[in-house]
Image (spheres, rainbow, N blue to C red):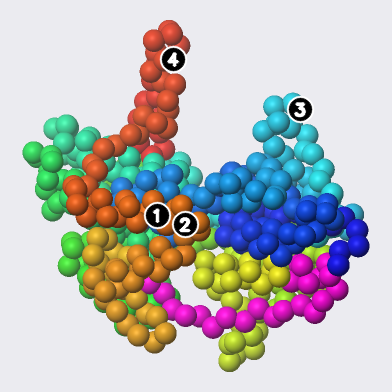
Amino acid sequence: MVKERARILVVGGGYVGMYTALRLQRKLKAELNRGEAEITVVTPDPYMTYQPFLPEAAAGSISPRHVVVPLRRVLDRCHVVVGEVTSIDHAVRTAAVSTLATAGRDGSAELFGYDELVLAPGSVSRALPVPGLAEYGIGFKTVEEAIGLRNHVIEQMDIASSTRDPAVRDAALTFVFVGGGYAGVEALGELEDMARYTARYYHNLRPEDMKWILVEATDRILPEVGPEMGRYTVTQLRRRNIQVLLNTRLESCADRVAVLSDGQRFPTRTLVWTAGVKPHPLIAATDLPRTDRGRLRCTAQLTVDGAEHAWAAGDAAAVPDVTAAEPGTETAPNAQHAVRQARVLGDNIAHALRGEPLETYAHRYAGSVASLGLHKGVAHVYGRKLRGYPAWFMHRAYHLSRVPTVNRKARVLAEWTLAGLFKREIVSLGSLEHPRAEFELAAGGKPPHSPSDDPKG
């Protein structure tokens, strides 16, 4: 039994953060009732984003509210703090936390003490020093970016439909995606599918007028599904008139012109950057051991190697893969491992507080599924390869089973059912990104936000 009050600080509200706190709620139910333990979750957003559904949210197949899970509802036994941990001094067990309240006061961070630390801040986009990328690039890691990209694509179709300038029209209808991993391929597939459908409602636009370009620096895309399925994906995308450029890098996107390493130049108003991720910058602001790639060095029991009372999992943690044949292999930073690691992590914290032996994390990679648009997909699961409709159906069935809470499962299933009975939504709500523009103009303030000032517009 826990003999004294244990303060558990969970940093991050993503897969690992939410599922670890949820597991701790169940495992430490008696201790929480007796006041012998407390769980604090610090997260920048009051919700967990189910990222595999971002492409479908961008395509309008799922409402953005149903892609996220409200943490306060799910973690009802935890203290949820909306803020960001800016630094951690594990030697004295304190974390500096910046919240909306501290930012509005004097900007100084608040210190949180803890006994057990769970580091799960996740990852951020790995942006390279490409000229123009910071000014014109669009990411695809958050629900806000997914919905913003959907609005942006439809707005570009509006621009192309209403202009007589062929250069403006061509740039508006050119969509460049950089990165051939899951995020890039699924986002491209879903959005191209949506735009192709939307074009039927424009009297002067045809699907053939649009240029969709996928740029990948290596010699294949979707490496997770294997070489054969990767080649099949390239073939299917090219059949949809999507240019797939392998062994090609983005050299510059300054002045809204995508310049590639093979010499091609594409004037474009849309450049989506999905070329990998890197550990959250918070990891570098701790006194905990890290690998050469900046991830936390962890053991197979999900403790931080050489640091007592510190735990980690997910994208920011280098966890040994004990099921791999080659020594030194680490588990892949994906949702499949993150969810399972969180379960073991929650159990091990409970074991440590009670003086029990710790469990070892061991999970053999089951495979991968990817959607390429409505009724199109690829899958490589337990050695079996699927393509087309069966793979797309497996993609939906798998992620429906994995999305947290019965509430979200029911809402997503209902939306899919209704989408099969009615036509797609083709509405752009870009004004939601600047809700005060109308009132500011009416009140005599600055004019509404101009698209020319928008990096995405």
x then y, percent, for residue 183: 41, 60
Which three-letter amino acid code belongs to the residue tagged 4?
Glu
Identify the residue under disc 4. 440
77 to the left or right of 37: left
Q: Which mark is residue 410?
A: 1
Q: Earlier in the sequence, mark 3 or mark 2?
A: 3
The stretch of residues the image draws in magenta is 348-369
26 to the left or right of 272: right
x then y, percent, for residue 283: 70, 58
Q: Are marks 1 and 4 in contact (CB under 8 Å)?
A: no
Crowding near the residue tagged with mark 4, few <14, some 14–19, many ≥20 C-alpha atoms within 10 Å: some
For the residue labelled by badge 2, is the local secondary structure a helix, a strand or a loop? helix
Front disc: 3 or 2: 2
Identify the residue under disc 3. 106
Q: Residue 406 carries which label?
A: 2
Residue at image location 24% in from the left, 43% down from the top: 425
Residue at image location 31% in from the left, 48% down from the top: 60
Residue at image location 21% in from the left, 35% down from the top: 158
Question: 347 or 175: which is nearer to us?
Answer: 347
The image shows residue 221, relative to residue 140, as above or below, that is below
For the residue labelled by badge 1, is the local secondary structure a helix, a strand or a loop? helix
x then y, percent, for residue 154: 26, 41
